[in-house]
Image (cartoon, rainbow, N blue to C red):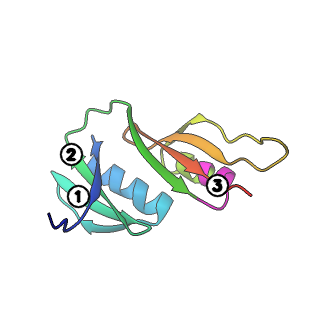
Amino acid sequence: MNVERLKYVIWANDMDRALNFYETVFGGEIIKRSEVISEVVVAGVSIGIHGGGEGNVTWTGMTFQVADVVEGASEVKTAGGVLTREPQEEDGEPPHLAMCRDSEGNEFMLTRKRS
């Protein structure tokens, strides 16, 4: 089998709001826009966003590694996302994890590379 492309698909109740979230927070590049399915590329990975979501909370398994989890968590909230676990220091080190939800209820993690 020749795999042409791989993408991860999440749901959105409001397509424009979802695209804006991933473009604003993660610097995503929107490569396809429609009401049914759109695509945004973040760090070289395609995320398909399928319309028709009902706003339910869904664990995605997506993790976005960033340099500063506290700053990233702030950007998530500013863009309409929520934190379900605030960044916390561990063993005297800066926070390495925040649990988040995007504007559509899709859960993901922000992480920092540990020393």
Give the residue number, with chain letter if any, for mark 2. 51
Read off the magenta span: 66-73
Q: Select label 3 or label 1 by which is in front.
A: 3
Query: In this picture, is 10 found above or below 32?
Result: above
Dot 2 amino acid type: Gly
Q: Is residue 1 magenta?
A: no
**Does label 3 or label 2 sit earlier along the sequence?**
2
Q: How much space separates mark 1 and mark 2, taking CA atoms?
A: 8 Å
Q: Are marks 3 and 2 in contact (CB under 8 Å)?
A: no
Mark 3 closeness class: few <14, some 14–19, many ≥20 residues within 10 Å:
some
User: 45 and 18: which one is in front?
Assistant: 45
Query: In this picture, is 75 found above or below 86?
Result: below
Query: In this picture, is 1 found above or below 87?
Result: below
Q: Is residue 71 magenta?
A: yes
Give the residue number, with chain letter if any, for mark 1. 38
Residue shown at 61%/43% (left/top)? 98
Q: How much space separates mark 3 and mark 1, taking CA atoms?
A: 28 Å
Dot 1 amino acid type: Ser
Residue shown at 27%/51% (left/top)? 49
Residue 25 vs residue 4: left or right?
Answer: right
Q: How much space separates mark 3 and mark 2, taking CA atoms?
A: 31 Å
> Residue 53: which numbered mark, if any?
none
**In the rendering, at what x and y percent does residue 24 appear?**
46, 61
Give the residue number, with chain letter if any, for mark 3. 112
